[in-house]
Amino acid sequence: MPTLGADMTKGTLIKWLVKTGEHVERGDVIAEVETDKADLEIEVFEAGIVERFLVEEGASVPVGTPLAIIASATGHPAPPAAAPSAGKDRVLAEPSERPTVAGPRRSHPRATPTARILATRLNLDLGAVPGSGVGGDITRADVERAAAASRAAPGGRGRASPRARRLALELGVSLETVRGTGIDGAVTGDDVQSAAKRPSIPGEPVPPQKGPVARRGPIAALMERSNREIPHYYLSLDIDVSATLEWLTGENTGKPVAERILFPALLLRAVAIAAAQVPGLNGYWQDGGFEPAADVNVGFAISLRGGGLVAPALMRVDQAGVTAVMANLRDLVTRSRSGRLKASELTSGTITVTSLGDLGVDNVFGLIFPPQVALVGFGRVRERPWAESGMLAVRRVITATLAADHRASDGHRGGLFLAAVEHALKEPTTL
């Protein structure tokens, strides 16, 4: 069981998405795991053949517990498949202790990559899907037809997202009675919440609404640890973003709504550029020392509709253009709120950004997510008098704040970092 955050001590294996004997590639999603904060997709980090499951579906196990044994396709034990855990690795699957008999690369039906992904999301067994592709391969269309037939069959059940299943248990809602509005009729978390709000039958007990409260527990524990163990220091800087916003308006002119760049994408890019230039703020405090990170993976604090907060990371933001960052951010927010985050996205952040400007907040003084050593906060863009070169004007200004770990850096380095953020924001063409 990989650690999916500094506050995680155990997890529940909801479902295996592969079968024994199946070949998996690095990055394949092989299981769904439930934590106190979210339901997550677990990736495998080495290619090989799934030899044996060590944890059954529905079992709760401590962090570090081996989940499966994966052997290489040649019969030799594969290296340990490990998931990143905020700077250190933990075992996800153990190598086989004995050689396996060499055999075909695949013991499951051949399917196109899109067909495999769709079958996993629809909870379909590819072994029961007839293939119509070249050489009998299973295509996406084959999976869609099989899914439609399954739903139409007597007793057929529509699928539900992990978040929907968890909310259904918490709110006392039967999934059989919920009409799904997701892809192919899937039941989403919002569907379950809507069903829970419908008037109940007179005399029927109302289940306790404990979801958001339960999710506050691990967040509170993590923030308590952060405030207790990390010697924070805070800096703030007002930044004139008038020219940046004018540039952004010009960039978005004529673009469809779905393709427009939002201001938070520029903030993420500016932080990533600054973190690359001042690496003492990008990394982890572990084993009594600072460990700089090789990449700049920016965590972004996202509030969940059902309550709670997650801060999944966008990978290598310093190397991506602002258009790519915007697309990745949209995808990350959507999957965060539908319970489809990957474990690696919660464990790979090297610095975190929180933005509360949409709530009218001027300044954000946050707590660092351990073992990271810095968190950057942004408030709202506001008009204020601004003096420059002996002239007074009304400018659009945003306040950037830095919460940093005094064990890893000091105010001088923190000041250099905020200055680098300001410089990047004032040069939007470089973002």
Image: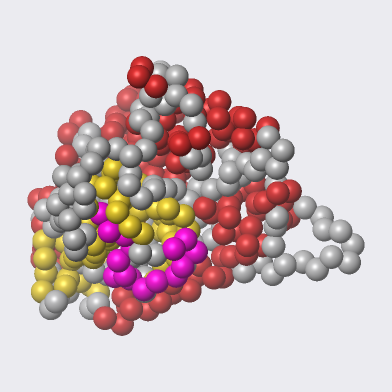
Depth order, front residue of 278/195 = 195
In this picture, residue 47 sits left or right of residue 142? left
Residue 64: within the magenta? yes
- How many marks are shown on the rendered structure? 0
Q: Position of residue 290 (x, y in %)?
A: 11, 69
Q: Quadrant of residue 352?
A: bottom left
Which quadrant is the C terminus positioned in? Answer: top left
In this picture, residue 353 sits left or right of residue 59? left
- Going by the picture, which residue comes out furthest to the right? 202
Q: In this rendering, does residue 352 appear at all?
A: no
Q: Where 386 falls versus 6 (above or below)?
A: above
- Going by the picture, which residue comes out furthest to the bottom? 228
Q: Position of residue 289 (x, y in %)?
A: 10, 74
Does the magenta stretch mainly form a helix, a strand or a loop? Answer: loop
Q: Where 33 falls versus 103 (above or below)?
A: below
Q: Please tell me which residue is depicted at 29% across the width and 38% down the height of the picture.
A: 106
Residue 143: within the magenta? no
In this picture, residue 284 sits left or right of residue 15? left
Depth order, front residue of 345/2 = 2
Q: Please tell me which residue is depicted at 29% across the width and 31% down the height of the picture.
A: 323
Q: Quadrant of residue 226?
A: bottom left
Q: Please tell me which residue is depicted at 24% across the width and 69% down the height of the picture.
A: 371
Residue segment shown in magenta:
56-70
Q: Position of residue 414 (x, y in %)?
A: 16, 63
Q: Please tell me which residue is depicted at 84% across the width and 65% down the height of the picture.
A: 204
Which quadrant is the N terminus positioned in? Answer: bottom left
